[in-house]
Amino acid sequence: MLVSLKWLKDYVDIDVTPQELADVLTMSGLEVEEIKTIEPEFSGVVVSRILSVKKHPAADKLSLCEVTDGERTYPIVCGAPNIKTGDIVPLAKVGAVIPGGYTIKSTLLRGEQSDGMLCSEAELEIGDDASGIMQLPRDWHPGTPLEAALSIGDTVLDISVTPNRSDCLSMIGVAREVAALTGKKVRLPSVRIKEASEDILSLSSVTIIDADLCPRYSARMIKNVKIADSPVWLKTRIEAAGMRAINNVVDVTNFVMLETGQPLHAFDFHFLEEGRIVVRRSEKGEVFVSLDGKSHVLPDDTTMICDGKKPVAIGGIMGGLNSEVKDDTTVIFLESAYFNPSAIRRSARRLGMPTDAAFRFERGIDPEGVLRSLDRAAQLIAELAGAQVCKNYLDEYPRKIKKTGSIPLRLDRLRSVIGAAIEPKETIRILKSLGMKVRSDGRGKYLVDPPSARVDIEREVDLIEEIVRLYGYDKVPPSLPAAAASEISAISRLELEEKIRCTFSGSGYSEIINYSFTSPASVDYLLLPGDDIRRNFVTIKNPLTEEQSVMRTTLAYGLLETLKKNINNSSFNLKIFEIGRSFINRGNNDELPEEKNILAGLLTGGVSEDLWGGKNAVDFYDLKGCLENVFYDLKIEHCLYEAEKTEPFLHPGRSCAVVHNGVTIGYLGEVHPDVLRKMDIKNTAYIFEINLDLLNEQVSRQIVYREISKFPAVVRDVAFVVSEDMEAGKMLEIVEGQTEELLENVVIFDIYAGKGLDAGTKSLGLRFSYKAPDRTLTDTEINSIHEKIVQNTIARTGAKIRA
Amino acid sequence: MIADIQQLEKDALAELENAGSQDALLAVKTKYLGRRGLLTGMLRNISQVPAEEKPLFGKRCNEVKVLLENKIEESLLRLSEGAKKQTLTREKIDVTLPGRGTRPGRIHPVTQIRREICDIFASFGFSVVEGPEVELDYYNFEALNMPPDHPARDMQDTFYIEEKTVLRTHTSPVQVRVMQQVKPPVRILSPGRVYRRDSDVSHTPMFHQIEGLLVDYDVSFADLKGILTAFLKRVFGDATTLRFRPSFFPFTEPSAEVDIRCVMCAGRGCRVCGHSGWLEILGSGMVDPTVFQNVGYDAEVYSGFAFGLGLERIAMLKYGISDIRLLFENDIRFLRQF
């Protein structure tokens, strides 16, 4: 809401600076976002009188004038046709600056001296009239600076009005607030209408068919209207509020809306067929052309203002092209109504027409202001358009507009909500300053009646807010509430996530955050088959772009996009991870989608950027190692990496599922070259995803100390020659599967294939470590156990011992 | 005979003096103190010393022996120290070469801010709770006192999934879900992603919020001020000036916007604070009785306050980031700075 201080001063005295006023308003809830200064587009222009006009001896279309500013007389050569002796006109003196930055100089025009310039409205950018010199009122004094005479120049506060304060969508509403805050009184404009003899009741009528949409509709008729430009004061007001001046009638309706908050509409009565108004619901598929020339298919339950035959306005939103006020309009049918706020909001949104009128109606206008505003506008139109207001007014009021009764206010409640005592006297003063009526029951309770414009005040807590708001939030002393134990327990997964962040960042991975929405094409890029669950998107009905139109079902695509972006920035070494949700549509509208907490990561480029000792490309095992570190940190043992279960978007020979206790918790692997090619990524990358909800279930938070053996371990190395297809994991599984108490662990210490071995075979070197908790093992003891394990392993794998 | 010893001592010391290496020293040692050494020989021949000189001769011999032994030991030590030193010098490396190994990665700035805020509120006894990001209209709006067609819905441009399902526009629905589950006292913090249909330098369609809620007997607006003041001073420093300003949220009343003195210009007015000298940091207010009614709390018995803040905004202020979109571009050159 743009509030001109000059205009505001019509309703309330202001004796503080604009900045001080802005601060006071901001600290009471009307946030002033900006203080704008409006300055004239010219300087050095004064009011002057023409003393004489003669023809220019050398030019037909020019005149020689003598013009006075009250002190001196200036010779001026002028080309305009509309000047005569005695006219009061704007004079731009030598040195004056007019719009466009032109400085007026003393000059010779066709041999005649000219010391200044007489100006048109257009030249001063005061109006559009360029046909002649601007004519000023006869009683204006020569010498007065024009900006002062025209009252140009203003300070405008841009106030952000919260949705509850519909009353402050008007100058009078803001004035009330200012008055309450600064201890002043509000001056309301006096409304007096001289009614003509002709009676509206005999000329027109209003029928409301759907009273739920329009509880009240009132109207006046104004005859002998002469449509013209508005006077400067009216234009200035409207333009200061950010609206465009159109003509005297339309400008008055806008002016009164800005003044009182009541939107009004003026119809050209001649275009109302049967001379009457019918208010009804829109019909299915009904089409209507609004006065901006746009055609609309009306949504259901839209309030339509109709004449005897057809719609003429979308109620509360915009008038129709078929009945708008035009230059030749002579009879005005002026509407002031109360429309159902919810209905207006619904229609305005569906139509995409957030008009000034709709904005006010949907927030709730002053139900008691309907007639006052009607009369105010009728009076102004009569004054400005030389017209007569017909006798009486129409007022269909079939449905009582809900009005809040007296609201009880308990002082002890006030104190307990605020946490500080505000004196009863101060409490009452504040309420009264806001125009509320206050009655006491003498026992710490009051009954309060808010003014009708404050439709937001219905409950005790609304009053409490008003009191503390005006009392000043800053005066409430801060205190700290006593802590009480709550039954809400911590979310274990979050603790897990923090540990994972530490492990990953410690391993060189940086955390990224991608948008949760993605492109529907993401699953195509990932080569997911038609029946893959990750094709069950949660789709956004009103996305910003196609690329952000569905919720992601996997974090993989986002990682690859991030990879691509970074490569484009020449960042080729990337270690990144993300923790976030994926969303799977359950295919069932009654249920919210499944939201899974996912950990995902990507690795590409060199092992380390800073390694001066050599630079190696990362591979599968770098990523796997980091993942294993996470599992180690969480004490998750015996994860299986199952190559047979993999993902369509991963290299089939370099990827696997991650399985723990029979539960697949994620995958890991090199990105499929086809995916990279499709996404136009030249660099190999490794990615993984782990479902944190599943991982969290696998984590045991119990730690049981095991005694450390004082006795040394005995180590035996064996190199098994096996088929090259034999997985190391399988081999270890077979060895470890032979439950032998003394075998402490087995690790792989060497892998070899090539010279000395048959083609199609490889050597897997295993290191067996034996240990007893209570004694040093003897060679004989170990040898027999070890031999048994080795022989068993050979038997079960067909391995040979490498010589 | 005594004189022989004196001479021997002198010769030995001179030779020791000249012995520059371990080998030379050991040679001297053998020459005098070895089994066939000169001093050993003298001692062996003590029988030939006249009886009256014997005690003195023996004493002197021993004195010289001890002296030589010590000297040799000392020199040997000195020599080996020197050799060690030489070795150490030879082993010198270039310490200015960068260290080997993996540089740690960075934690996303938004996560860092979230951790900081959650830690502070944990110290105030607040527990972290979560809720769905795809949320029912009921929890996102209706239960929070924003019925359909409420103008306050304009404050949050919404992504719709179905007519009654939205991407949550704030983390406030979690407070409703929690209050439906547990009885007061409640002290919760709900961090997470939220979504609004908006995209420019200061808005991304997804961002992060933290919502806090405290409900108990006798919680007042003064308590709201106390907790939030303590919190903001922990985040922005004890010297931070703040102000509480009336505002409007449908689910709180009275509501307050909390501003801090601009951290960029100390209140003089700059581009960051829009020349107002103040920065909006969080929204807050006393829980509206309607919300309590919706979750079955008795508003006459319990009271509480809620607050919410955007993590990106705090991160941008703390780190001087001017374009919010940078936070989600995941440019590694950006992320490495945090």
Image: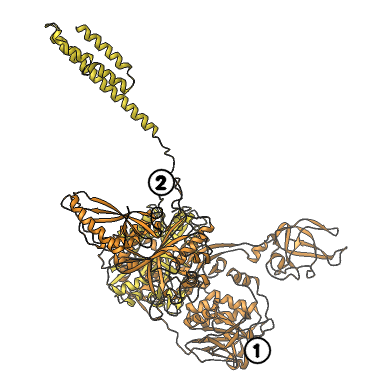
Residue A60 in view (yes/no): yes
Residue type at numbered disc 1 = His
Query: What letter labels the chain drawn in orange?
Result: A
Identify the mark at residue B100; answer none if there is no mark: 2
The image quadrant of residue B144 is: bottom left
Q: Is residue A732 above or below residue A715?
A: below
* Closer to viewer: mark 2 or mark 1: 2
Residue type at numbered disc 2 = Arg
Cβ atoms at labels 2 and 1 below 8 Å apart: no
Identify the mark at residue A653; answer none if there is no mark: none
Q: Position of residue A778 (x, y in %)?
A: 18, 50
Question: What subunit carries mark 1?
Answer: A
CA distance for labels 2 and 1: 90 Å
Q: Are marks 2 and 1 on the same chain?
A: no
Q: Position of residue A206 (x, y in %)?
A: 55, 91
Drawing shade for chain B: yellow
Residue A479 in view (yes/no): no
Q: Is residue A42 left or right of residue A607?
A: right
Q: Secondary structure at mark 1?
A: helix
User: Closest to the observer: A205 or A610?
Assistant: A610
Identify the mark at residue A270; answer none if there is no mark: 1
| Neighbours of disc 2 within 10 Å: few (<14), some (14-19), many (20+) | few
